Amino acid sequence: MTGPRPTRHAEVRLRPATSDDVDHVVDLKSRVLRADLERLVGWDDGRSRARVLEHFSPRHTHMIVVGADTAGTITLRPEGDLVWPEMFYLDERFQGRGIGTIVLTEVLARITAPVRLQVLVGSAAQRLYERHGFVVDHDDGVDVWMCRPGS
């Protein structure tokens, strides 16, 4: 079942995550990152699930809703003077339609602190982050570490 194909004008909103959303996030990660992780380091279902469980926090996580569909997730984890966007997964049915741009624009507008993130080498998401003012700090062959100064 593919569901609706949203356009750039679709209703996009963020809702606070609940503990009931964790399995959805685990599933999203598997569908969105599996091919890239297999290419870079190999895939392990158990390790992937454990990492989501380790980093999932309803307090810092939002579910991305498009119309009536849960299309993705983003976590904004504070750490000292920084904010780390993590687990920014958008279901493949909703990619390429400007939704990632809408979400990133909205969340970055709320953040005045410096922002750091990591993106997998070769991921198309790196271009999205660069369009939002992130610059590459370093590349370790698996992850590209990027930063954006605070405002």
Image: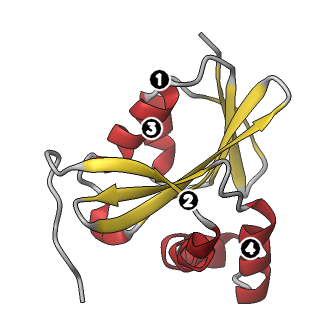
How far is disc 1 from disc 2 in space, using C-alphas?
A: 20 Å
> Residue beneath label 4, please?
41
Query: Residue 104 got which mark?
Result: 3
Q: Which image quadrant is residue 46 in?
A: bottom right
Circles 1 and 3, Cβ within 8 Å, touching? The answer is: no
Residue 93, above or below 103: below
Query: Residue 109 got which mark?
Result: 1
- Quadrant containing the C terminus is top right
Which secondary structure, mark 2?
A: loop
How far is disc 4 from disc 3 in space, using C-alphas?
A: 27 Å
- Quadrant containing the N terminus is bottom left
Relative placement, left or right, of 13 versus 140 is left
**Residue drawn where x is 17% and y is 60% of the image:** 6
Which secondary structure, mark 3?
A: helix
Q: Residues within 10 Å of mark 3 (few under 14, many from 20)?
A: some
| In the image, farthest residue toward the top | 151
How far is disc 4 from disc 2 in space, using C-alphas?
A: 29 Å
> Residue beneath label 2, please?
17
In the image, what residue type sits under mark 2? Ala
